[in-house]
Amino acid sequence: MFNIEFSDDAIADLQWFKKREQNIILDGIEANLRYEPTVETRNRKRLRPNQTAEWELRISKYRVFYDVDSVIRIVSIEAVGLKTGNTLRFRGKERSL
């Protein structure tokens, strides 16, 4: 089992969403990243090298970007965004990885 921790930026990203959306995102993180965060699935994929994170989790229209330390078994959530079409937004502002 992996422990899940949030960066300060990820907490700020999460707080930008409404409470109902926060619960959807947190439930998705718990269900998908607690046990096998490095196994690629339909909703989880390894990203090309970038400054944000190594992995992406897709929860409906939400995107969770995270890194994994397999040695000490920690999933570090780096950013949480909203994807509409080809646009990725963090705290309401468009940003690319």
Image (spheres, helix red, strand yellow):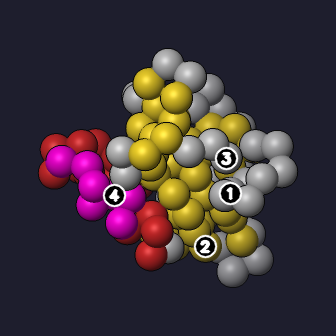
Q: Which residue is mark 4?
A: 14
Q: Which residue is mark 1?
A: 53
Residue that appears at 16% across and 51% down: 19
- Of tags 3 and 4, which is closer to the observer? 3
Examine the image and state in which quarter residue 76 appears: bottom right
Residue that appears at 66% across and 58% down: 52
User: Of label 1 and label 2, which has the lower sequence position?
Assistant: 1
Q: Amino acid at mark 4?
A: Leu
Cα distance between the residues tagged 3 and 2: 22 Å
Q: Amino acid at mark 2?
A: Ile
- Of tags 2 and 4, which is closer to the observer? 4
- Of tags 1 and 2, which is closer to the observer? 1
Percent x, y for residue 18? 18, 48
Q: Secondary structure at mark 3?
A: loop
**Main secondary structure found in the magenta portion:** helix
In the picture, measured across the screen, residue 84 lies left or right of residue 25, that is: right
Span shown in magenta: 12-18
**Residue that protrudes farthest toward the right in the picture:** 49
Q: Is residue 92 above or below residue 7?
A: above
Percent x, y for residue 65? 58, 52
Q: Nearer the viewer, residue 51 or 22?
A: 51
Residue that appears at 36% across and 66% down: 12
**Residue that protrudes farthest toward the top in the picture:** 85
Q: Amino acid at mark 3?
A: Leu
- Of tags 3 and 2, which is closer to the observer? 3
Q: Amino acid at mark 1?
A: Ala
Residue 16 forms part of the magenta stretch: yes
Whether tag 3 and tag 1 are in contact, CB under 8 A, the answer is no
Cα distance between the residues tagged 3 and 4: 17 Å
